[in-house]
Amino acid sequence: MSKRFAWLFGVVVLISFGLLVACGSNYNPSSDGLVLVASQGSALIETFSYNLYNGHLSEIANTPIDTSSETCVLNGIPSSLVINPAGTYAYAILTTNSLCPGSVTGLQIFKINSDGNVPTVGSPVSFNPENVLLLGTSTPVSPAPPVVPYFMVMDPSGKFLFVADRATSAPNPAASGTPQPTSDLYIPGAISVFAIGSGGVPTEVAGSPFFTTGTTNPPTTLTQAGLDIVSVAASPTLFPKIGVNGVQNSACSTLTPPTTEYLYAVDGLGNQVFEFQVNTSTGVLTTPPNHAQIPAFATDQTPAGVAVDPCDRFVYVSDSLTNKVSAYSICDGYATQSSSNCPPSPLPPDGSLVQIAGSPISLTGSSNGPGPLLVDPYGNNVYVLSLLSNTVSQLKISPVSGSLSALTPATVATGLGPVAMAIRADDNWLFVSNYGTASAGGTTVSQYSITPATGELSVLPAFPTDNYPWGVAVK
């Protein structure tokens, strides 16, 4: 966790900020947006405000000017970061790190104050470990291996947090005499689920973490690394309402939203996306109806991200090895279901995915190594972050078929090493955190305004951040 102390770099940062930020650093919720950035260099959350009319930026707290010598501010290294729909609380995954003595892995809650500051609320909430059996036995792995949380989303209702837990390994307590006589045990990935209670406090739900074996079969260790859950996305039980700009309206604005919720989880090693049903009262994940086990749907090679259309029509998965996006219709029987992609069935619809014609869809332009992707809040566009080309692909959704077509230009540039992105609920602003390197001139967040009629991104000046920004969230 290196820190940059060179006086010359400090001067450059100060000059850059002087050019980029608006006069004053006050945050006015009625006229300003708020950007939160998870810095892994100092292990803290930075806050910036920006004018909703022109995008001009102001620093609020923990910005590079005040954190040049800070380390290990939080009780762990922050990564994935989300804000609840009400804009009152933020949540960050913290990970223990040997360079921060006493650090822990857990969920940290932050209160978003009216002045834009985000103080911590309580201590990090720990994750339940994985209760896994040794392959071919009824013996639990002991001690129970900890989860490795990676990517987090909040469901559109703001009731639950879903965390993608990576596949990992653990020392084998019995390297012989079991069906897996190796020095390491391969532990499957899973999904941790937290319910949001009073005061925004998250509590892990009963049975979490949940495995792709469902509730009928106990999870076991694997013979090789597998079931690497890298991304999750939940279907909506709330639909977007009419926006400030009429052209942003989706066809679902006047429709009744579904009462059934599904969670889609991407397995980056198995080239598949799993489907769980979500209990909308408790957050517990179960096998969808009509299935004896958790269903899986094929993707292209090495999927990395998943996003669900806010109108409950389509699911999109980025395929990082082939520079493509797999596109699916959600077949759940609701009014937004595709009549052409979801054929009539004697069984009730169950949230299954059907690949649309032409899927997987090739990304054009300079896209290389697609990772995180998101659908805009009105269901008109898909934005795909390409990690190897330092770009964002911008695509238009066909509202009938769900097919994607590239806008012009097909890609816009980010900073060096993009890792995460967030879009404001009004569909007017998008931000990308750029992990970068010290030798390449610093780390930044890229800022874009969105043209309401088309979804096209207009590049604004990137702004410098503290070292190694990872998660980014916007209010």
Image (spheres, rainbow, N blue to C red):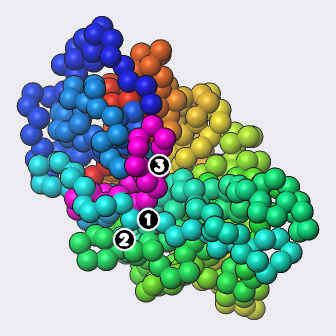
- Amino acid type for the residue under numbered disc 1: Ser
Q: CA distance from mark 3 to mark 2?
A: 19 Å
Along the viewing direction, whichever of 386 and 269 lies nearer the viewer:
269
Q: Which residue is mark 3?
A: 96
Mark 1 / mark 3, whichever is N-terminal: 3
**Residue 123 in view, yes or no:** yes
Instruction: State left or right for residue 390 relative to residue 101.
Output: right
Q: Position of residue 215 (x, y in %)?
A: 67, 84
**Highlighted magenta segment, given as a residue range:** 88-111
* Alpha carbon separation for disc pair 2 and 1: 10 Å
Q: Nearer the viewer, mark 3 or mark 2?
A: 3
Q: Position of residue 438 (x, y in %)?
A: 44, 19
Question: Mark 2 Cα within 10 Å, few/some/many (few <14, many 20+)?
Answer: many
Circle 3: residue type: Thr
- Residue 91 appears in view: no
Residue 472 shown left or right of residue 230 in the figure: left
Disc 1 and disc 3: Cα gap in Å? 11 Å
Q: Quadrant of the N terminus?
A: top left
Name which of mark 2 and mark 1 comes first in the sequence: 1
- What numbered label is drawn on residue 202? 2
Residue under label 1, please give it.
126
Left or right: residue 167 compared with residue 425:
right
